[in-house]
Each structure stands twice: as structure tokens, then as C-alpha cells.
Image: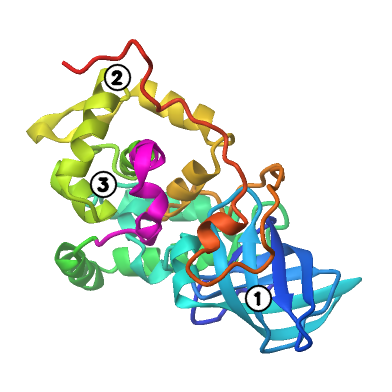
């Protein structure tokens, strides 16, 4: 197995996608492809039908949030079909939910306290390096192996670690791209998805920082790009469902009940899996999009107009249980 040395990290995947495009004579074509690997800027899929380079296609993930326009950069024979390389349009990148490894928090990745001594970091590195080494046919993961090496080289050198800690303190966490989607703003669906967003952020925080698992409303505002007035109802509801509680310094903390809900709902709610994958990277996170059953597709135009693609080929998502019941009442 070769280590990926491209400038942008890529992760392997098995997700299925629908590709739609028009020929010069106006004929509409479509094919299905299986993901080979994915980055923030594009994707490579294996398909039975070739697509001419420089063709603009509409790509839609089955049971996932990735949807939008892309340009075919190359199309080469691959097995019994073709490997098609696509470069995402800017609007499409926001739906991919891909985290740049350059922004990986090494402490979160290793799941250790920032004050952990060298012996702990060394022990974790020794245990995980063999697991992620590209020569391991069962659990090899070139991308994680490179991040693990970079983390170890940085944190095992006192001077480099001090410089890294200083840069980490000055790093302002911004809004995750996935929260730019309209699904987190409009109507009841937006309210339900905001609850999932809050729970996902707290879940990832507890996994990566077990000694400091809380987030303030200000933290949620920054990560979700929404004012706290949009989150007040969501946090009230989640607290009354006992999915979260208030910890030290009035920070919101995920409860064991909240963990159980997320893990039971993950395979049934595609956008929840995307939310969890869009959070901070850590060594035991999934290597790529989870394999999901193909949803039944509603009839829709094969080539929606730009700006309308969120609904045009959108697969119906399973309802989640974050809708308020008739018996719920506000305190």
C-alpha cells in the first residue's frame, strides 16, 4: 500500500453517487459510481460509463448530504469500468464535510490531555503506529499514519511542542462548513438538525477531551455560525430530554443518555453521520463515510438549476426522534 503524498488529504470511501450531465446535443446522461477516495476539493469514483473530461456534472450522494456541481478532470480505464476524477465547485465543497488534516488538533487526535507527559504520548504512538501503518493489510490507514507521525514528531520534541501549544492557543475555531447548509436554518427540519448539531459537537468534544468535555453557548455559536437565540429552544429541549446537562462554568455537557441516543441514531440518520465526521479528527474516528443502505429516490429533474440542487435529488431521510412530543412542555 502506498502512502498518499498529495497536498490535500484524501480518505477512502465506499459511498454510492449519482452523476448527471448533458451532452453537446442536449441529451441528458446519468450513471452511478462508487467512491474510490475523497478530499475537500474533489472526489474519484469508479463507474461503468465514461464521462468526457471538462464535462460539468451534478453529483448526489445516496443517503448523504454531498450534492452539487463538479467538473470532470480525468476519466481513465479502471478495472471493468472507469475512474472519474471530479473537482468540486465552491458551493459543493460545503456539503462534503471534509476536515483538513492541517487543522487537526494533535491532542484531540491522540485523545490525550494537552498536559499529558511524553511517556503517555510515546505509548499511544507505539500502539497505534502498527495499526495504521500502510503495510498492515487489515487496519492500515495511510492518512492517519501520516497524522500520527506528525503528531508524535511535534509533541515529543519539547521546543516544537511549546511552539505548537502557542499556535494552538491562538487558533480560533471557526464555523464548520456543514452548518452553512439550509437544512440547519429553515423550519422544523432546521430546528431538529440544530439539535443534532449540538449533540454531535458535544459528542466529539467528550470523546477527544474527556477531562474537559463541555462547550459554552459562545463555543456553539462559533462552531455552528448561529446566534444563541437560535439555539435557546434547542438546548432547552435537549436538557429536558436529559441528553445534555450543565457542567462546570455553566458549560453544556453530553450525558450518557445523549451518547446512547446518538450512537443508536447514527446509522438511521445520514446527516447525523455527516455531522460526526465533520468534527475534529481523532485516531479512532471512521476513515471515511459510513456504508449506508441506498435510499429510495423520489422522481426529480436530473439536472437541477444551480442553487436548487439541495432539493432536486435529495433522498428522503429517516425521521429522528428529536421532534418534540405532544406531552413536552416548556418550563
Is 239 part of what is drawn in magenta? Answer: no
Residue ID at (45%, 76%): 90
Task: Give the x, y percent position of residue 106.
Answer: 34, 59
Q: Quadrant of residue 76?
A: bottom right
Residue ID at (70%, 48%): 297
Q: Sequence-wise, which precedes: disc 1 or disc 3?
A: 1
Q: Which residues lie in the magenta part?
A: 174-194
| Residue picked out by circle 2 | 242
Task: Give the x, y percent position of residue 254.
Answer: 30, 30
Residue ID at (73%, 57%): 137
| Residue picked out by circle 1 | 57
| Residue picked out by circle 3 | 113
Task: Work out whether residue 270 or residue 301 is closer to the camera in this orientation and state it.
Answer: 301
Q: Is residue 192 left or right of residue 331?
A: right
Name the residue furthest left: 249
Looking at the rendered image, the disc whose residue lies closer to the viewer, 2 or 1, is: 1
Looking at the rendered image, the disc whose residue lies closer to the viewer, 3 or 2, is: 2
Residue ID at (60%, 60%): 141
Q: Residues within 10 Å of mark 3 (few under 14, many from 20)?
A: some
Task: Give the x, y percent position of residue 5.
Answer: 56, 80
Q: Quadrant of residue 35?
A: bottom right
Looking at the rendered image, the disc whose residue lies closer to the viewer, 1 or 3, is: 1
Amino acid at each position: 500500500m502506498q502512502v498518499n503524498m498529495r497536498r490535500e488529504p484524501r480518505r477512502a470511501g465506499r459511498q454510492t453517487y449519482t452523476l448527471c450531465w448533458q451532452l453537446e446535443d442536449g441529451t441528458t446522461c446519468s450513471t452511478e459510481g462508487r467512491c474510490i477516495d475523497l478530499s475537500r476539493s474533489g472526489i474519484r469514483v469508479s463507474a461503468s460509463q465514461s464521462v468526457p473530461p471538462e464535462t460539468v456534472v451534478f453529483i448526489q450522494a445516496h443517503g448523504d448530504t454531498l450534492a452539487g456541481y463538479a467538473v470532470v478532470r480525468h476519466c481513465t480505464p479502471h478495472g471493468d469500468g472507469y475512474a472519474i476524477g471530479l473537482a468540486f465547485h465552491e458551493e459543493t465543497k460545503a456539503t462534503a464535510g471534509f476536515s483538513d488534516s492541517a487543522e487537526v488538533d494533535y491532542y484531540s487526535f491522540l485523545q490525550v490531555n494537552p498536559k499529558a507527559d511524553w511517556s503517555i504520548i510515546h505509548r499511544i504512538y507505539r500502539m497505534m503506529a502498527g495499526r495504521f501503518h500502510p503495510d498492515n493489510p487489515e487496519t492500515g490507514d495511510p492518512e492517519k499514519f501520516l497524522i500520527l507521525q506528525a503528531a508524535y514528531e511535534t509533541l515529543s520534541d519539547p521546543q516544537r511542542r511549546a511552539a505548537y501549544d502557542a499556535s494552538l492557543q491562538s487558533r480560533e475555531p471557526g464555523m464548520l462548513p456543514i452548518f452553512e447548509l439550509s437544512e440547519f436554518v429553515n423550519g422544523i427540519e432546521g430546528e431538529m438538525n440544530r439539535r443534532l448539531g449540538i449533540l454531535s459537537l458535544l459528542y466529539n468534544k467528550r470523546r477527544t477531551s474527556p477531562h474537559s468535555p463541555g462547550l459554552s453557548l459562545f463555543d456553539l455559536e462559533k462552531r455552528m455560525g448561529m446566534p444563541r437565540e437560535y439555539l435557546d429552544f434547542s438546548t432547552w429541549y435537549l436538557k429536558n430530554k436529559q441528553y445534555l446537562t450543565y457542567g462546570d462554568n455553566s458549560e453544556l455537557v453530553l450525558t450518557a443518555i445523549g451518547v446512547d441516543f446518538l450512537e443508536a441514531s447514527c446509522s438511521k440518520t445520514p446527516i447525523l453521520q455527516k455531522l460526526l465526521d465533520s468534527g475534529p479528527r481523532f485516531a479512532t474516528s471512521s476513515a471515511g463515510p459510513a456504508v449506508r443502505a441506498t435510499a429510495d429516490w423520489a422522481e426529480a429533474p436530473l439536472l437541477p438549476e444551480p442553487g436548487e440542487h439541495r432539493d432536486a435529488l435529495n433522498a428522503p431521510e429517516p425521521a429522528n426522534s428529536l421532534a418534540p412530543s405532544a406531552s413536552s412542555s416548556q418550563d
